[in-house]
Amino acid sequence: MGWEVVIGLEIHAQLTTKSKIFSGSSIAYGAEPNTQASLVDLAMPGMLPVLNKEAVRKAIKFGLGINAEINTTNVFERKNYFYPDLPQGYQISQNDLPIVGKGHLDIENEKGEIKRIGVTRAHLEQDAGKSLHEDFHGSTGIDLNRAGTPLLEIVSEPDIRSAKEAVAYAKKIHSLVQYLEICDGNMQEGSFRMDANVSIRQPGEPFGTRAEIKNVNSFRFLERAINFEVERQIDVIEMGGEVVQETRLYDADKDETRSMRSKEEANDYRYFPDPDLLPVVIEQGFIDAVRETLPELPDQRRARYIDELGMKEYDAGVITASKELADFFEALLEYSGNEAKLAANWVMGDFSAQLNREETELADSPVTAQMLGQIIKRQADDTISGKGAKDVFFAMWNGEGDDVDALIESKGLKQVTDTGAIEAFVDEVLAANPEQVEQFKGGNEKLMGYFVGQVMKVSKGAANPGMVNQLIKKKLS
Amino acid sequence: MSVTQDDVVKIAHLARLAIDETEMQGYADKLTQVMDMVEQMNAVDVEGVEMMSHPLNMSQRLREDEVTESNHRDDYQAVSPSVENGLFLVPKVIE
């Protein structure tokens, strides 16, 4: 019997505002502990939260990006629980009336099919501080710099049916929030965190009991955590047991999920409207103004690459998945004179490979879009061969210069495209290999490669291989 | 609806309130009265009345996104019973 896997994801995206959701403290990452925690963030008595307009704007932008309803009246509520990194004793969140209602997003699943995943809602809330459990003589250290950072919690419908689909959905949201410039997507710094609700059932049966895997911060771990959890639940049920509803943590070192049984009654949050905050009323004009600022989104960009640049679907998908990569690609088009095919090959091939090899972020690449664009331009106009282009690229990467033409000159990479000169190389090779010429004429066409190789050798790699090919064919026909 | 002593224990625990054994029945009785009043209100016909989340018929004012707070950590931590390296120290919390 085959089990069906049912997954819903909750994604917390920190919004890239300057200040906190309810106070004027900075949210910049990495400051000294508690230097960005104001009286409001510390929940001192008598402090009143005041909502950040930009957080509202960014939440609306997300809603428009997933074709969702925007709730023009939405309400902040208190979600009550005790934890030292939550000084208020409650998290200000949204429950009954979130700012973003039902929307959707299309993903490509592992069978290559387009699948629509529903987004139930997205709501604004405040992040908690951080608890540091190590090294304080038996105490826990609390840093409240993060407390009050604006979060958008994006809740999917339980439409996801495999770990791979979950990753495709999470990556799509990750790409989208960066395109929309509402979240920096930095997973190491915790700007983008994922919880997965996982259950299994026999197809056609009602949903099974779910376990919630908390705080996964990489796509790889998300896939592994879900796969582990599915196997665990299958084992439990097939051994005659029952899955219990609980929160589990994924331990990447052991590649397993573990029950987090510490918070008894953890789910009794006793939500009620926060009396410190009035209902948020959004004017249609505000929504329209946000709509004006929507950029070209990944799906639109991908369609444009396919339709207008004639790119393959797969290539267009890979490049547009990352806004940064797609922006780089478009800069290459500008500097190379619209050499889309060569630019795509570089971006997906040698350039990405080199970034990976050197563990370098795109933004830190020593070869800029302008430099690589110039290389591509010279490759396209046959000044240099593909191999020559790589030589220039690596020379630039290693800091040997930033002028493409000067490097081509100094490294002697200029291709010989003068027919007379190449003809002389070809004649020399054919004259030196009479036996092979006879065999070729006798039908052994595989020798073509041998001739080309010899000509390239004689020309010290400078001859244009396409022209060499043509000339040999012409001479031997 | 009557609130039992068990309910009071549970509510007190959720709110981290220490309630003396001798006060339990008193709280249970008073909370029962509150619930009775809620029951009474439930009987009112509110058909067609829009729900309010706040007694004031106003909407939330929004703040411009500007950093207006500066670092006053030393002042704020002066009232804290235990701090170290800029962190507030609290009894060990185990995840």
Image (cartoon, coloured by chain):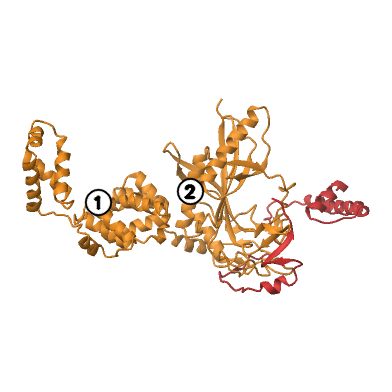
Please tell me whether residue A341 is drawn above or below residue A183 in the rendered image. above
> Which numbered mark, 1 or 2, is in the foreground of this view?
1
Q: Chain of mark 2?
A: A
Label 1 neighbourhood size at 10 Å, few (<14), some (14-19), many (20+)? few
Dot 1 lies on which element? helix
Front-most of residues A149 and A57: A149
x and y, in percent, of residue A454 in the image: 15, 44
Q: Of the numbered discs in the image, which one, if any, rests on residue A363? A: none
| Kind of residue sitting beneath label 1 | Lys
Chain B display color: red
Query: Which residue is under mark 2?
Result: A171
Please tell me whether residue A43 is drawn above or below residue A473 in the rendered image. below
Which residue lies at the image location 35% right of the left edge and 46% below the top edge?
A: A315
Label 2 neighbourhood size at 10 Å, few (<14), some (14-19), many (20+)? some
| Kind of residue sitting beneath label 2 | Lys
Which residue lies at the image location 34% right of the left edge and 56% below the top edge?
A: A329
Dot 2 lies on which element? helix
Q: Is residue A167 left or right of residue A232?
A: left
Q: Of the numbered discs in the image, which one, if any, rests on residue A387? A: 1
